[in-house]
Amino acid sequence: FRYDKSMDIQILTIIGLSITAAIVCFFTAMTGSGSGLILVPLLILAGLSPVQAIAVHKFEALWTVVSGIRYWKNKQVLTLDFPWYLFLGSIGTFFGAREIHFISNQTLQIIVGGAILIVALLIAFFHKQPDPTKEIKLWKRPVLIVAMLFFGFYEGMYGSGNGFFIAALFFSL
């Protein structure tokens, strides 16, 4: 075994990114959105390919399941439609994660940058406060259910801003 100083830098980078991911997860669990907007560009800047950065983000995002369980226990999700969201979202995610491997790194970097810009602009200019007393109309439920297939595909492909997009759809309908 040979000692190599570059290993020290790599270890420090991994530790720094791990701490950053933990902080991002903390805030993402509270807001439901934001981890991909922060973590994926940092991972790319740290030297990972876009596919590797997105894959790390996907595993980091698994920790938000804990906050999802808390929302479920507090009955803050539409429990009637949730199995459909989960089922169709999972199908979409499977195909999105499969398709990302057919896109070049240069194209993915453009997609990552574009998605971050679009989400940032939407948040800055079109953010609307939700009305907790608003009842969801019966005809809107199928729209939300079918939309989960497309959100799942986007989440599997990239996913940055997906929490914001889903929340915006729920609040706007």
Image (cartoon, rainbow, N blue to C red):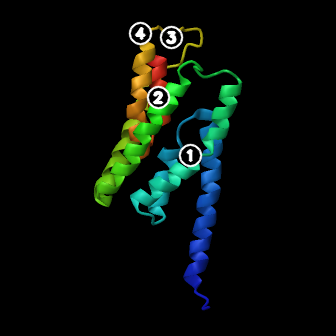
Q: Are marks 4 and 1 in contact (CB under 8 Å)?
A: no
Looking at the image, residue 169 lies above or below residue 14: above
CA neighbours of label 1 inside 10 A, class few (<14), some (14 to 19), many (20+): some
- The amino acid type found where label 1 is placed reads Ala
Disc 4: which residue: 139
Residue in front for this viewpoint, 33 or 128: 33
Q: Are marks 4 and 2 in contact (CB under 8 Å)?
A: no
Q: Residue at x 61, y 89 (%)?
A: 3
Disc 1 secondary structure class: helix
CA neighbours of label 3 inside 10 A, class few (<14), some (14 to 19), many (20+): few
Q: Which tag, 4 or 1, sits closer to the chain's start?
A: 1
Disc 1: which residue: 61
Disc 3 secondary structure class: loop
Q: Position of residue 154 (x, y in %)?
A: 39, 40
Q: Which tag, 2 or 3, sits closer to the chain's start?
A: 3
Judged by depth in the image, the label closer to the viewer, 4 or 2, is: 4
Looking at the image, residue 1 lies above or below residue 163: below
- The amino acid type found where label 3 is placed reads Ile
Specify whether 101 is left or right of 28.
Answer: left
Disc 2: which residue: 166
Q: Are marks 2 and 3 in contact (CB under 8 Å)?
A: no
Which quadrant: the N terminus?
Answer: bottom right
> Residue 136, which numbered label?
3
- The amino acid type found where label 2 is placed reads Ile
Q: Quadrant of residue 96?
A: top left
Q: Are marks 1 and 2 in contact (CB under 8 Å)?
A: no
- The amino acid type found where label 4 is placed reads Trp
